[in-house]
Image (cartoon, rainbow, N blue to C red):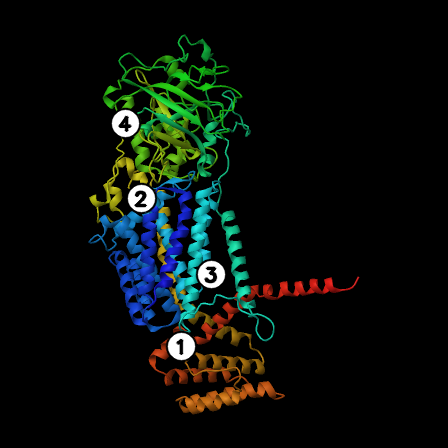
Amino acid sequence: MNYRLSVSAAVAVILASLSLSSVIKGANWFVTGIGAVAVVAVAGILTRRSRLASAITATVAVLIVVTPLLSRPSWTDRAIGLVIVVVTALSATGARPLRSFGVLAGYLAFLLLYLNLVFAHSSSFGQLIPSYSSLSELGRLWRSSFGDFKYLPPVTDYTAVSLVAAAGIGAVAVAVDILAVRLRRPAVAGLPLLLLFSVPVASNLKVFGIAQMLIFAVSLAGYLSLLSADGRERLRMWGRLVTFRHVQSPDETGSGPDTRELAASGRRIGLAAACLAIIIPVIVPTMHTHHLFGTTAAGGTGGGATAGVSPLLTVGPLLASKPKQVLTYTTGAPDPSLQYLQVYVLNYNARANQWLQLPHPHVLPLTVSPTAGGLPWTALGLIDTTPVQSIKTTVHISKDYSGPSILPIPYAPTHLDLHGDTNGWFESRDSLMVFNDGLNLAGLAYTVQSTEPNPREANIANLPVPGNIEAQYGSYHGPDRAQLRQIARARTAGATTPLQRAQDLESWFHSDFGYTLRPALRGTHWLPTFLTTEQRGFCSQFAWAFAVLARLVGIPSRIAVGYTGGVQVPGSGATWRVTTADAHAWPELYFTGEGWLRFEPTPTGPLGQRTAADPVYAGVDNTLPTPKNNPTAGPTGPAGSLPTSRKHLLPHGLEHGAGGGLTSRRHATGSDLWLAIGIPAGIFLLIAWPALIRVLTRRRRWLSASSDGELAHAAWRELTDDLADFGLGFTPAETPRAVARRVTREADLDESGLQAVIRISAAEERARYARLPDPGAELKGSVRTARLAFSASVPRRQRLRARLLPASTLQAAGRLAERAGEMFNWLDFSWPAVRRQLRTMGQRPG
């Protein structure tokens, strides 16, 4: 076996995958992608041997892969696994649909074994055979990766991203190997290679420099080498390769070789490739510029600090759209992920039933500071014994920033360096917001010194709240107050201090609630529904609910809107990047002696707000158990092994929270039911479609035949299809009488079967040529008798194949595919005709 073409196909995929370097930063994904391509190439070589050897190889690989299904207690899972294995094994019969299924299953099984070995081997049987835990781990990594793909490219290359990249590259390798090596259509194999180039285009990556040009040239060279290898393979079938260095001369007719068919094929492929290149970027969403928190209550945009904005309503659209970089920063914080950047501070307005920006009755310009760079106001609530940490942060706003004229800064700022330009800058006393109305902050760089409380649980004393804070931030007189108070008291019944009540609320949110950007909530009176039945939302709902419940149990609260700490820029040391996908809203609770402290009720991690983080004093454990701690956990095992604060990371239906979590579990159960029904139904239709179409065709023929002549034609078509199905053959050139003679001579039919064939042939002959056809009332029974005689005259294997894979249906499907492939034939004739017409017009006189 010559492996040149297989190696060329693998090299072409590897070179084309280099285009992903524009959207993924790192090298691990490329290494794992090379491994995936190599595994696919090996799978192709092993499944291109003899029919029996190929079927055995594919069946063994599929059997290993479906081991988790076969070991499950559910009969549905076992049935699905057995069906997949049996259908793969039946590919040894040589039937084209079964062989195609077996080949594809073999490719995918080898690829899945490789991915399981690389990314989830610790949870596998013997580090190699997939288990339910290892497949669950792959699924978790797969889901978590898509939380990063919505961020501005290039995304960080970590385990989940490498998994998705390797799986995608492996899938393209499967398509290329099938098209180029099995079907010997290397030109068409350029279409899946084009998918790899479509990824950077679809992500709206605007960088296309020397590196991208070199990558494109190298990938094109790989594709051309694939075409060249296929050409050499085709020439070798005719003997030794001979190379001509001169141009072929015209033949005796005076013209060169006829290349019209080749040119037509090239036009078809080029048209399909162009359509694919245009359609894919249109279908896949691209990145757009957003006005960060720039929506006023009236729906317009406003940038100033006094614009009367309602920022809480704008966080959701930002999170649901493609991200855009906002800023980068360097900081001296011990853990930058815990350092949020505050923009707005909101207080509840009962009349509007909305959290609105704090008014600014007390603002001072920065120039009144007695010390250089010092800010005029200090944080409220701190006492001399409060442990604090001083942090220096340098921020660079992006050049295309179009948000409000408020500085994103860590709370609470004490010094600010704007490089000497303090004109028009003000600070608000209550919120410590620093703003400059009407100024565009794009490209601005500044350094802020902030003093942040650094408490532990033991440091937060139970001190009385000042009256002015209680009056401004301690009351709630909105809708459903009595019901919400009952919920808040029930969730904090065992707490004896304000801190314990806040911790109980946060633990409840982390244990029973899930994250979604599309919560099923109505426009009014939504808060009780969110807390009792829906229990799913994003940061705006969580911040609102937590702040309201905190007030109802005696803790002053407000809401801050800004950004989380973002993600660290790979290879940049201490530089962190913040995008619009890090937009966030969080509640702040007041504790005398500590001031305003941030809490985090929103689910965090891969299945929540990805860059959100719980503060240390909230009493929440952020650690996730590794898969090896619970390798045999079933569908309900992981929820029990997770800490209470991390159960929100599990898909709904695996959680075991109290009070209200049942709604999500019901949805998951319904989805599992449809999945359990849909997969077997899909496999059944995949296997049984030829037989089903044959039955439907038979019924349609008899139902549409009304006259004697139509009944004769229907009986004749049924007879010829039965001859094809049972391997007795039929050609359209045969007359009915010739068919009857041949069947009588060659087929081993009983007397009733022979008479039925003769009767049908005679009826068709009279329907074609006689003035009046024979009565057709008995023809349906004759067809049935002939079919039973054909079935009894052939071996059992041929009989089974005639029922499951009728040749008449497969032949009809092949003819339909050929007609579909001829849809571009107009290209072969239209342009030459137009060219001749233009030439004729040019030759006309005058």
Where is 260 relative to 326, above or below? below
Disc 3 versus disc 2: nearer the observer: 3
- Are dots 3 and 2 in contact, CB under 8 Å? no
Residue located beneath label 1 in the image? 802
Residue located beneath label 2 in the image? 159
**Residue type, numbered disc 4:** Val
Q: Position of residue 98 (x, y in %)?
A: 37, 68
Residue located beneath label 4 in the image? 616
- Are dots 1 and 2 in contact, CB under 8 Å? no
Disc 3 versus disc 1: nearer the observer: 3
Whichever of callouts 2 and 4 sits on the residue coming sooner in the sequence is 2
Where is 717 relative to 89, above or below? below
Alpha carbon distance from label 3 to label 2: 32 Å
Alpha carbon distance from label 3 to label 1: 33 Å
Q: Is residue 312 visible?
A: yes
Where is 9 relative to 238, above or below? above
Q: Residue at x 54, y 58 (%)?
A: 271
Q: Residues within 10 Å of mark 3 (few under 14, many from 20)?
A: many
Alpha carbon distance from label 4 to label 1: 71 Å
**Residue type, numbered disc 3:** Val
Residue located beneath label 3 in the image? 188
